[in-house]
Image (tube, rainbow, N blue to C red):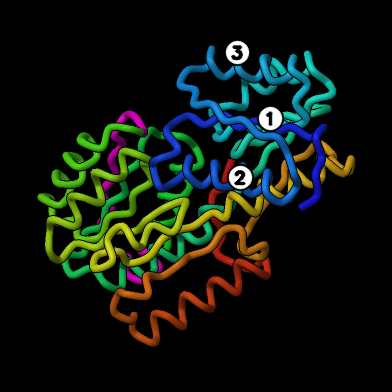
């Protein structure tokens, strides 16, 4: 491992790193940067825009090389604080805001979400699917729209119910929302709710005949008998690529886009789940190749 005492990286997450999803993956990325590049690293959980700015400013004043705000919601804070500390690179995961020392990582999460929709439409017995999010952030909405489009490419008559919990950390509310949708005959649920998603997984584990699709990290092990698969972002790899640029002095401010071709975003089927019909799997493989080649179905641009 190359030691670089002058290279320091800070990570701000909007929720707990124990969520086994979005925030946990970011923390894994921070640790990978530490272990691979020899960086000194720090993490802090922040909840409000005021805290976003306060911590961005604190790490900039302390001379950190790279500060990552993990989420679309950190964009405004990066735009306000970035110009104050031109020697620090600020990056957000999600969004399109850039500046002289500001980058945004954009993940085409909608592409594997479309593939998940194909799989979901193939296994539903009721013809009713559901999507549950934490809050209605644009990237979450885009992935849900893509999931719906993928499902309707298989069965135009499928119904997709949509719900948002209103936060990202209330597992009890997540379970309650999932049970309410199951009561409306939803038998496949695509969740993107971070720590609140733990409650959704619990509801599915307790309800025979219902499938769940994980998000952000490979969550298949959270419900081995009920997970259809997971829509995964390899956040650690993305963080490492950006951090290496900053460390090596080759960073250029831009929107760094990661799509299917990069393998940073991908559909990961649950190996413990029954195999999909050969025709369905062939369709998923064909669409995945099309996305990688830039010829996939037209989707709403991911922020």
Hey, which quadrant is residue 210 in on the image? bottom left
Q: Quickly name the residue at label 3.
A: 54
Q: Nearer the viewer, mark 3 or mark 2?
A: 2
Q: Of 53 and 37, which appears nearest the observer?
A: 37
- Helix, strand or loop at disc 3? helix
The span from disc 3 to disc 2 (Cα, nearest Å) is 23 Å
Q: Is residue 158 visible?
A: no
Q: Does residue 101 sit above or below 258 in this rendering?
A: above
Q: Does residue 285 sit above or below 23 in this rendering?
A: below
Which label's residue is closer to the chain start, 2 or 1? 2
Seen at 83% across and 21% down, the residue is 86
Q: Nearer the viewer, mark 2 or mark 1?
A: 2
**Drawn side of residue 44 relative to residue 8, left or right:** left
Where residue 135 appears, as percent x and y from the top left, is 38, 33
Which label's residue is closer to the chain start, 3 or 1? 3
Q: Quickly name the residue at label 1.
A: 67
Q: Is residue 219 visible?
A: yes
Where residue 197 appears, as percent x and y from the top left, is 31, 44
- Helix, strand or loop at disc 2? helix
The span from disc 2 to disc 1 (Cα, nearest Å) is 14 Å
Where residue 241 appears, as percent x and y from the top left, is 73, 50
Other residues around mark 2 within 10 Å, as few (<14) / some (14–19) / many (≥20): many
* Highlighted range, magenta: 151-168
Seen at 39% across and 42% down, the residue is 19
Q: Quickly name the residue at label 2.
A: 31
Hey, which quadrant is residue 211 in on the image? bottom left
**Drawn side of residue 289 relative to residue 66, left or right:** left
Labels 2 & 1 near each other (Cβ < 8 A): no
């Amino acid at each position: 491992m190359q030691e670089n005492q002058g290279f320091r990286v800070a990570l701000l997450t909007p929720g707990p790193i124990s969520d086994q999803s979005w925030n946990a993956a970011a923390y894994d990325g921070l640790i990978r940067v530490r272990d691979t590049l020899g960086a000194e690293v720090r993490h802090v959980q922040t909840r409000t825009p005021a805290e976003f700015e306060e911590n961005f400013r604190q790490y900039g004043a302390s001379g950190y090389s790279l500060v990552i705000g993990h989420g679309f919601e950190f964009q405004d804070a990066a735009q306000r604080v970035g110009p104050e500390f031109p020697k620090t690179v600020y990056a957000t995961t999600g969004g399109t805001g850039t500046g002289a020392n500001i980058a945004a990582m954009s993940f085409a999460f909608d592409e594997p979400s479309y593939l998940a929709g194909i799989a979901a439409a193939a296994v539903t017995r009721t013809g009713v699917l559901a999507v549950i999010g934490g809050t209605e952030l644009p990237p979450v909405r885009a992935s849900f729209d893509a999931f719906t489009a993928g499902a309707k490419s298989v069965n135009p008559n499928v119904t997709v119910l949509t719900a948002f919990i209103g936060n990202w950390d209330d597992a009890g509310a997540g379970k309650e929302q999932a049970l309410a949708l199951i009561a409306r005959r939803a038998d496949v649920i695509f969740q993107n709710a971070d720590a609140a998603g733990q409650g959704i997984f619990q509801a599915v584990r307790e309800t025979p005949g219902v499938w769940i699709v994980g998000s952000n990290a490979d969550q298949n092990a959270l419900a081995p008998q009920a997970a259809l698969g997971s829509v995964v972002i390899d956040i650690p790899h993305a963080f490492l690529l950006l951090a290496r640029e900053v460390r090596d002095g080759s960073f250029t401010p831009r929107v760094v886009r990661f799509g299917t071709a990069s393998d940073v975003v991908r559909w990961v089927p649950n190996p413990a789940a029954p195999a999909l019909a050969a025709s369905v799997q062939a369709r998923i493989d064909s669409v995945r190749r099309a996305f990688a080649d830039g010829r996939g179905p037209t989707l709403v641009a991911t922020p």
